[in-house]
Amino acid sequence: MSLLFYRRPDYVVKLPGPMSLAQCQIYVDRTQKHRRAIPPELSFDNVLQNKALPPCALQDFMDYLVYVAHDAENLQFWLWLQDYTKRFYATPKNEQNLSPPWLEAEQAQQHGNASDQPPRTADKPRGEIAEYEFKLDHAETSLSPINTPQYDKQSFISGVAISNKTVADSVDDANAQMGLKWQSFTIQPFRTEINRVISHYLAPNSPRELNLSHRTRATVLHALQHTTHPSALAPVKAMVEANLRGQSHPNFIRWSICNGNKPRVLFVRNSGIAHVIGGLILGILLVLSGKSRWWRFFVAPLFLIGISISVAAYKGLCVIFHSTHCRGLRPWEQFGDNASLTTLGGTVDDEATLSTDDVYSLPQRSKRAISLDTFGTSNSFGHELWVDKYRKTPLIRKIFSRQIWVQDQTVRLLQDRIVIQSHIWSMLITVPLTALFVALPEFNVI
């Protein structure tokens, strides 16, 4: 990475309309041009595997998608699919055989007539199917941690109860809207879980509906009627992964490098501009006066500080926070149902720096983990208490918010690079500008 010309990852604008593989590939192609802006330590895979530390941990990525980008359903679905794939291939072979892979050729061949008729099962051993049906009728299955058809399932994180009858009705409605009239196989492994995923992510108007086109939605639902094999979700997987890698992840890294909220960064940027304007006014006054030329060198510190602060703030950094490698708390980190800034010790008016343990042990941290629950509530957050509290917070309190240490070393190094870069640019501009003021003749007007 060039020290002088380093740039944060460019902001990737979200294309309008439903997700398509062609659009997602555009995201990937755009980000390939700026791969050096994201170090390997902050790669998409490292963030998803939770190898990066805050502010680039997996929970921070989810917070960004929920509260800033407003498309967290892609990451929630992706995390579930990764876990589901591992669990599916960990089941016994005889159970996997009940859900054969969904091949593209098979998909194209059956798409014309399979929506009205169930698929043929001649290629499946009837004895194996009958035996599996008997097991389902006379034993409690444990194929999936979500497969509990005897009673309503309640998430221990979100506390949202969803009955199997409601899920089944939602799946039937989704299939009906796509023109798929026959019922899915109920003897296949993880069928109950797949039905819940359909009702939660794939059905129209579902709580976490993925932004899919009508054609893609119909193709995937048609495949899931035939099999619960992960390959049935391949079209959605490809689009979600391309969207996360090419659009969400670069924007998240760009956002994470910033260490201050918008009011703070604007305040610092305006302070830098004020220093530059002050230096210009001082230089003009000294030129118009009869003072010695040596007095004009006093404009240099104002230019140096002002330009350096402004360049860093333009890239989202507050040099005051950076001096201690801290960042301001995000709005959703400041308030919770049972926690506020006052519960962390001291008063709200105190300008203190919080330790990492203070924030990441707060009740709202575990509450925000609901977004990592596969079958949690929708991703709307207007009802959360911090929204109204933060809206009523005075501007001065938003500017001088509390701080927390930046744990990830790679993020700190990127911030160091940007600040050093701002100092270099400031020197390159200040030296000729100061020389210009010193070289101007005296006018003796004042």
Image (cartoon, helix red, strand yellow):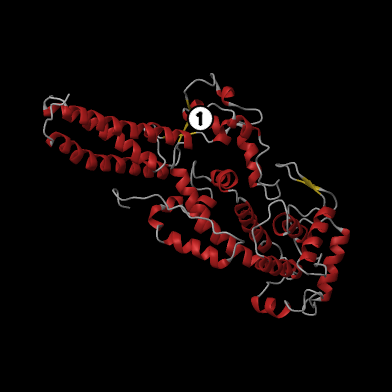
**Relative to 261, is 277 on the left or the right?**
left
Quadrant of res 337: top right
Would residue 261 be visible to someone looking at this image? no
Number of marks in picture:
1
Seen from the viewer's position, the closer of residues 127 and 2 is 2
Quadrant of res 390: top right
Q: Quadrant of the C terminus?
A: top left
Residue 44 position in % (x across, y down) = 50, 54
User: At 66% from the left edge and 36% from the top edge, which residue is drawn?
Assistant: 384
Q: In this picture, is 275 found above or below 176?
A: above
User: At 60% from the left edge and 60% from the top edge, which residue is drawn?
Assistant: 17
**Relative to 227, is 331 on the left or the right?**
left
Report which residue position mark 1 lands on: 398
Residue 98 position in % (x across, y down) = 76, 70
Seen from the viewer's position, the closer of residues 380 and 139 is 380
Residue 126 position in % (x across, y down) = 83, 75
User: At 33% from the left edge and 53% from the top edge, which residue is drawn?
Assistant: 1
Q: Amino acid at mark 1?
A: Lys
**Relative to 200, is 279 on the left or the right?**
left
Seen from the viewer's position, the closer of residues 76 and 45 is 76
Q: In this picture, is 398 found above or below 369?
A: above
Q: In this picture, is 197 found above or below 270?
A: below
Q: Could you say whether the residue bearing mark 1 is in a helix, strand or loop?
A: helix
Quadrant of res 266: top left
Q: In this picture, is 421 found above or below 441?
A: below
Residue 148 position in % (x across, y down) = 80, 53
Would residue 63 be visible to someone looking at this image? yes
Furthest residue in direction front, as rendered: 445
**Relative to 194, is 20 on the left or the right?**
left
- Mark 1 surroundings within 10 Å by alpha-carbon count, few (fewer than 14), some (14 through 19), many (20 or more): many
